Image (spheres, rainbow, N blue to C red):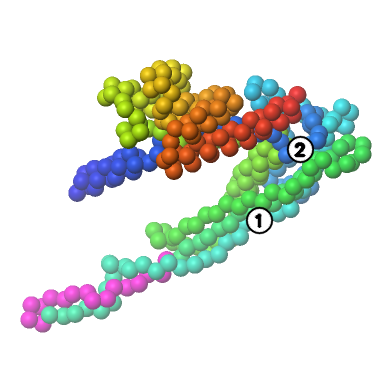
Amino acid sequence: MKLIFNTFLVLIILFISGCSSKKLTIKALQPSKIENEKIHTIRIDRFYRDDVNQTESIANKIANKIVDNQRVFEVKYNDFGADAVLTGEVLNSSLNSYVYYRSEIDYSRCRFYRYDEKNRTRECIEYQIRSIPCEKREYNVTTSIKLIKPITNALIFSKTYDKSSFDDMCYDRHPYYPFYPDSRDKFRVNTQIANDISSDILDDISPHYVYYDIEIIDELDKDTLVFSKEQEKRFEKVVELILTKNLDLAKTQLENLDKEFNQKSFEVIYNLALINEAYNQLKIANELYNEAKMLTLNTKYLDLANYGISRTNRNLEQKIKAKSQLP
C-alpha cells in the first residue's frame, strides 16, 4: 500500500512539473536609494539599544559588499575622510505568544456505544474529542537608521525597518507546559531577523542585484511556423540547454535556427532575447524583444514580449545609475 502511495505521489509531482512553465533566473544591477551622494567611506556608530547584534551584522555586510568584483565601501573608524556616518536604534526586539486549542477526534477512546444484544457486540457511535494545546509565537525586530554627513550632520538617508517571524506548534504527541519567554530562543531568532534587516539596509544604501524568474518559450507554434521534426527536436534541446544554464551553446543553436526560419519565429527570437538579458546585454535584448513582438498575435506571447521590453528598458536605466554610484 505504501509503495502504491509513493508511486502515485511521484506521478503527481512529475505531472505538476511537466505542466509548470520553464523559467530562467536572471539578475539585474540596481542603484542605491541615495540619489545625490556618492557614499564609499562610512563610519558606523554602535546602534542604540542593540541587543540583537544589529551593529555587528550591518558593519560586516558593509565591509564585505562587493559588486562585479569591486568592493563598494571602506569602513572608517573616525570622521576623517568619511563620506557618511551610519547611526541607528533598535526600536523593538520582542517575542509574543498566545495559546489556542485545536479539536481532534480521538478514535482510541469511545464515549458512547451501541450494543447488539443478539450478537453480543458493540459499536462505537461517538468518539472522544481531544483539545490539543497549540502555541503561536511572533518574533519581531524594528530598527531605525540614519545616514548623515559628518561634521554638518546633514541627513542623507533615513528609514525604519520592521520584520517578523512566526512559529506555530501543536503539542499533540508530548505534554505541553505553559510557555514562558526563553531569552536564548528570543535572542537566536531575533538576531537572525536583525541580520535580514541588515541585508535590506545594504540594498537601500548600495548598488545591488535583484533576481527575476523569466518564462522560457519551450515549444514552437505549428500554427504560425512551418518546421521539420528535426528542427523541433533541436529547439527542444535548446530549451534543455537554457534550463541547465548552458547559455553559450543554446545561443549558437538559436542563432542557427533563426537563420533557417528567416527571422520569422517568435519563439526563437524571444529566447535569444532572454539569453542576451541573462548576459546583461540589455540593449540587444530589448531590440530582440521588440522584434519578437512584431511576429505574434498571441496574447500571452505579446504580454511576455512587452514585459521584456519594459523590464530591459527600466533595468538599463537602473544599471547606468548603479554603475555611476560605484567607486
Q: Is residue 253 visible?
A: no
Residue tagged 1: 94
Dominant secondary structure, magenta: strand
Q: Could you say which is closer to the camera, residue 59 or residue 145?
A: 145
Query: Which amino acid type corresponds to the residue marked 2 in the rendered image?
Result: Ile
On screen, residue 19 versus residue 205, left or right, reads left
Q: Residue at x 13, y 76 (%)?
A: 121
Q: Residue at x 61, y 33 (%)?
A: 313
**Mark 2 vs mark 1: which is more N-terminal?**
2
Query: Which amino acid type corresponds to the residue marked 1 in the rendered image?
Result: Ser
Q: Is residue 7 above or below residue 173?
A: above
Q: Is residue 138 above or below residue 68?
A: below
Occupied quadrant, residue 220: top left
Q: Residue at x 19, y 49 (%)?
A: 1
Q: Looking at this rendering, what residue extends furthest in the bottom direction? A: 117
Q: Helix, strand, or loop for circle 1?
A: strand
Classed neighbour count for the residue bearing mark 1: other residues with Cα under 10 Å, few (<14), some (14–19), many (≥20):
some
Q: Is residue 110 visible?
A: yes
On screen, residue 122 versus residue 173, left or right, reads left
For discs 2 and 1, the disc positioned in front in the rendered view: 2
- In the rendered image, residue 280, in percent from the top left (x then y), is placed at 57, 25
* Residue interval drawn in magenta: 117-132
> Alpha-carbon distance for marks 2 and 1?
30 Å
Residue tagged 2: 34
Question: Total label count?
Answer: 2
- In the rendered image, residue 89, in percent from the top left (x then y), is placed at 77, 48
Classed neighbour count for the residue bearing mark 2: other residues with Cα under 10 Å, few (<14), some (14–19), many (≥20):
some
Q: Looking at this rendering, what residue extends furthest in the left direction? A: 118
